[in-house]
Amino acid sequence: MNDHAVRSPAVAGRFYPADPDQLEAEVQRYLNAARAPEDCLDPPLVKAVIVPHAGYPYSGPIAASAYVQLACSDVPVRRFILLGPAHFAPVDGLALSGATAFDTPLGRVPVDAAARDALASFPAVVIDDYAHRPEHCLEVELPFLQTLFPDFSIVPLLVGEATAEQVAEVLEVLWGGPETRIVISSDLSHYHDHATARRLDEETAAAIVALRPEELREDCACGRAAIAGLLLAARRRAMHAELVDLRSSGDTGGPLDRVVGYGAFLFTAPAPAAY
């Protein structure tokens, strides 16, 4: 593997610890504190999650509440489709990384080359490492996945000016079976007071649980386009969405006058018909 094609961490030491031992211990602490499923023997398979992407002291507990549910399965996970907003560079459509792997302090995660080839014919998908280089939204999810899953590849996509239909089409191509899961990385409302943020985030959560992307406000989440695409795909597949945690930076240690909202959501497939 050409090391020049490996994406280096952009926010290690800022959003999460750069020391591997400290990082592993912090992630494990969040997971241990999260409410685990009561029965992991025969749970519904969690196909997709929506999780936040702020600094770990603020959003880590909320993200962990979804990840412990995602890991409750005896089906080996081989691939994660990661989608989040492009915060630092304009993106027309969806930006796929051209890197062969992403590094974190916990090790190297390969990028699925076959998936990149499958998306090559999509006009809405471009290779854009400039957008990926400084971006935190996908990177901060990887240590959680590395802690819970032993061996997997990723398809890292940043969503810019894209429609819900474009995102849903990409998800359909990559959907796969239970070996493939989807992680949508997004915070919710930004920089309202605590009470206002709670009200707005509850409205957003209601739209997500109802699988109604048309009811998402334009400013409801930085990852609105990615969320809307997942909701469209999930609705077409008659999936079930569930809210597992809804808090803000004001709840996890930040000031109450200017908070960022965080939500954790699960998406499960309908149970197969009984024989």
Image (spheres, rainbow, N blue to C red):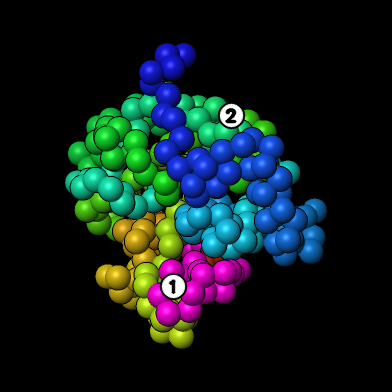
Q: Position of residue 12 (x, y in %)?
A: 50, 40
Mark 1 and mark 2 in contact? Answer it, CB < 8 Å. no
- Quadrant position of the C terminus in the picture: bottom right
Residue 270 visible? The answer is no
In the image, residue 1 sits, relative to residue 193, either above or below, namely above
In the image, residue 88 sits, relative to residue 179, either above or below, namely: below
Q: Is residue 76 magenta?
A: no
Residue at label 2? 107
Q: Secondary structure at mark 2?
A: strand
Residue 259: mark: 1
Q: Mark 2 Cα within 10 Å, few/some/many (few <14, many 20+)?
A: few
* Residue drawn where x is 71% and y is 49% of the image: 28
Disc 1 versus disc 2: nearer the observer = 1
* Residue numbers of the magenta segment: 236-262
Residue drawn 35% across the image and 40% down it? 134
At a point 28% along the width and 48% down the height, the residue shown is: 88
Category of crowding for the residue at label 1, using alpha-carbon neighbours closer than 10 angstroms: few (below 14), some (14–19), many (at least 20): many
First in sequence: mark 1 vs mark 2: 2
The amino acid beneath tag 1 is: Val
Residue type of the residue flagged with mark 2: Gly
x and y percentages locating residue 159 in the rendered image: 31, 49
| Disc number placed over residue 267 in the picture, else none | none
Task: Identify whether 126 is placed above or below 268.
Answer: above
Quadrant hosting residue 125: top left
Estimate the x, y position of residue 151 in percent, counting from the top left.
63, 31
Residue 30 appears in the figure: yes
Is residue 64 toward the left or the right of residue 6 in the image?
Answer: right
Kind of element beneath mark 1: strand
In the image, 114 versus 151, the foreground residue is: 151
